[in-house]
Image (cartoon, helix red, strand yellow):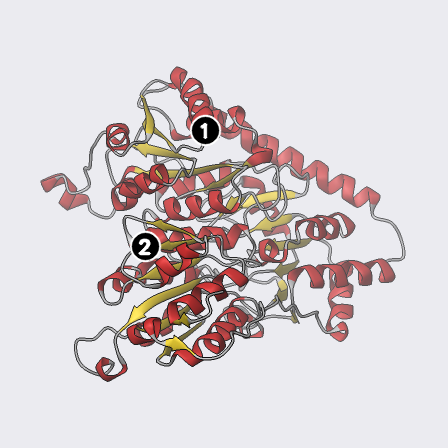
């Protein structure tokens, strides 16, 4: 450490102690150079929302044990970042945002933008730091907030004079540990009894499974009961979806067996999920008995009446339930497990046969499901992290893409900002550089954030971006009928492969299904060299979705 440090140095040193590997940022903020001096790599984005997304994706893949950080300029920089932080808040992602801030004597003068106040509704905790001596304490509180209870973004607005102010004394800072809580044993016993008494138990798995790294325990409990596993949108890949008890995940669309098994269930164990009502996730059917296991007690009985609540870390809850069920069970479950696996396999086979005409289509413009099929067959999904974007592409990819490893998909959508997937897939690649990281986008999404693919090129972030170019905002077709008929309001267009080429990104534009596999293989080789690749697919409008109701 420097013998004499200013505020920016203090922040950088603490970020280093907390394991920060890179700083997503956009100038001006003095902490950027301070971080660079001690070898924390700055990655400058083209637009602040994507910088936030990079920090978001990194935090997801490191499961909140390490936290992505984004730094922004006061005023317009942090104003531009608001949408990204709002998205991270909706998804409960533990990341740190550090904007510069106006001096204390300007905080209450219009039109000063007071970040800590403005961002309070979309952060788990936000604060304004006006004294350099407060920095270690404020950062300790920030990391504690990110690493305990329900995760979420945290913001520290640092007044500009603080960055240059001399820090007196010795920096005495210790990294903040992740704190976990175990469930009340008095609640675990009746929960286990209810699950064992159920005729058709079902496990509803949310993103808390990812943060707890509890995929193995989840699979063990599912086989022990036995019970199928239905993941939420952000919970997708809670267990590998080629597991015989996995039903896949749900947004508005879902696999058919997901709907069948959800309708059949009498007791639902919802774990690692807030059970928040959202248009872009599954719904809890009426008349079900609900055991709600979550890290935050405030979510229990929030949107759904709960019959029994368990509060704690998802892994610790699962382990407690496994032990208690083993203790209470009086006979084996081999026949029931075999029968359930058989039922799910038969339902899955029938669903896949129903969708084979879409997946195997040779039509042009190209069917989006053919693209998904060919990518799944060509890549090694054991070494892939994938995500969708907002809009039709979410409804097409999420139910069809079958994960083969727990934690290998980033689902999102309680807020549904077009273009957000590009930032989080860059963050995922930075968190897991050995993985092939793929994001699927529509052309409308690319229009929102596509310029930041140059950020990937400039920083050697080897992602694969797949753009479904159907030249229309397809999701709105039934909404803006008059506007489109009279003025062509929904028609959009462009050659995104050429855009990518102009941004120093290797790209291919494919308009024939037979050319897809060759382009995918080229993309894999490009990313292996540490470079991004864009695959633009000239696609049909695409209004076929795997929508099956269970209410």
x 35%, y 53%: residue: 51
Question: Does 514 sit left or right of 179 as displayed?
Answer: left
Q: CA distance from mark 1 to mark 2?
A: 27 Å
Q: Which residue is mark 2?
A: 49
| Mark 1: secondary structure | loop
User: Is residue 551 among the parts visible in the rendering?
Assistant: no
Question: Does 456 sit left or right of 503 as displayed?
Answer: right
User: Is residue 400 among the parts visible in the rendering?
Assistant: yes
- Taking the view exactly as shown, the residue that stands out farthest to the front is 3
Q: Position of residue 305 (x, y in %)?
A: 56, 71
Question: Does 152 sit left or right of 492 as displayed?
Answer: right
- Taking the view exactly as shown, the residue that stands out farthest to the top is 514
* Label 1: how many Cα within 10 Å (few below 14, some 14–19, many 20+): few
Q: Position of residue 313 (x, y in %)?
A: 65, 65
x 44%, y 75%: residue: 135
| Quarter residue 388 falls in | top left
- Taking the view exactly as shown, the residue that stands out farthest to the right is 330
What label does residue 529 carry, if any? 1
Mark 1 or mark 2, which has the lower sequence index? 2
Depicted 135 relative to depicted 504: above or below: below
* Label 2: how many Cα within 10 Å (few below 14, some 14–19, many 20+): many
């Amino acid at each position: 450490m420097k013998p004499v440090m200013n505020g920016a140095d203090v922040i950088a040193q603490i970020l280093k102690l907390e394991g920060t590997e890179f700083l997503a940022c956009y100038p001006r903020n003095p902490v950027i150079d301070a971080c660079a001096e001690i070898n924390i790599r700055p990655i400058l984005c083209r637009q602040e929302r994507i910088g936030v997304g990079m920090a978001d994706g990194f935090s997801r893949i490191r499961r909140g044990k390490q936290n992505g950080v984004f730094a922004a300029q006061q005023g317009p920089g942090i104003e531009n970042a608001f949408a990204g932080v709002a998205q991270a808040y909706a998804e409960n992602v533990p990341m740190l945002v550090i904007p510069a801030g106006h001096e204390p004597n300007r905080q209450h003068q219009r039109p000063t933008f007071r970040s800590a106040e403005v961002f309070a509704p979309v952060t788990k905790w936000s604060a304004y730091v006006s004294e350099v001596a407060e920095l270690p304490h404020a950062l300790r509180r920030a990391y504690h907030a990110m690493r305990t209870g329900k995760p979420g973004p945290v913001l520290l607005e640092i007044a500009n004079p603080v960055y240059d102010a001399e820090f007196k004394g010795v920096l005495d800072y210790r990294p903040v540990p992740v704190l976990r809580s175990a469930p009340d044993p008095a609640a675990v016993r009746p929960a286990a009894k209810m699950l064992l008494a159920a005729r058709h138990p079902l496990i509803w798995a949310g993103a808390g499974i990812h943060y707890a790294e509890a995929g193995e325990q989840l699979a063990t409990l599912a086989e022990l009961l036995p019970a199928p596993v239905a993941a939420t949108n952000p919970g997708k890949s809670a267990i590998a979806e080629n597991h015989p008890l996995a039903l896949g995940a749900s947004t508005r669309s879902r696999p058919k067996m997901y709907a069948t098994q959800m309708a059949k269930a009498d007791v639902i164990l919802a774990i690692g999920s807030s059970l928040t009502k959202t248009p872009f996730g599954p719904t809890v059917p009426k008349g079900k008995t609900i055991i709600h296991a979550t890290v935050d007690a405030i979510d229990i009985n929030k949107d759904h009446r709960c019959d029994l609540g368990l509060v704690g870390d998802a892994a610790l809850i699962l382990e407690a339930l496994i032990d208690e069920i083993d203790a209470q069970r009086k006979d084996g479950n081999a026949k029931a497990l075999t029968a359930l696996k058989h039922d799910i396999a038969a339902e899955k086979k029938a669903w896949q046969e129903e969708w084979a005409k879409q997946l195997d289509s040779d039509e042009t413009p190209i069917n989006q499901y053919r693209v998904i099929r060919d990518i799944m067959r060509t890549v090694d999904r054991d070494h892939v992290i994938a995500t969708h974007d907002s809009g039709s592409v979410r409804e097409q990819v999420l139910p069809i893409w079958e994960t083969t490893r727990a934690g290998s998909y980033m689902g999102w959508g309680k807020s549904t900002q077009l273009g957000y997937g590009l930032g989080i897939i860059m963050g995922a690649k930075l968190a897991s550089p050995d993985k092939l990281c793929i994001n699927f986008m529509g052309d409308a999404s690319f229009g929102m954030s596509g310029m930041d693919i140059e950020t990937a090129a400039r920083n050697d972030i080897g992602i694969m971006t797949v753009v479904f170019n159907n030249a229309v905002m397809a999701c709105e077709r039934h909404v803006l009928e008059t506007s489109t008929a009279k003025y062509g309001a929904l028609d959009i267009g462009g050659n995104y492969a050429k855009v990518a080429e102009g941004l120093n990104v290797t790209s291919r534009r494919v308009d024939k299904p037979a050319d897809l596999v060759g382009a995918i293989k080229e993309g894999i080789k490009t990313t292996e060299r540490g470079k991004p690749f864009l695959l633009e697919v000239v696609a049909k409008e695409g209004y076929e979705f795997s929508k099956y109701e269970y209410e």
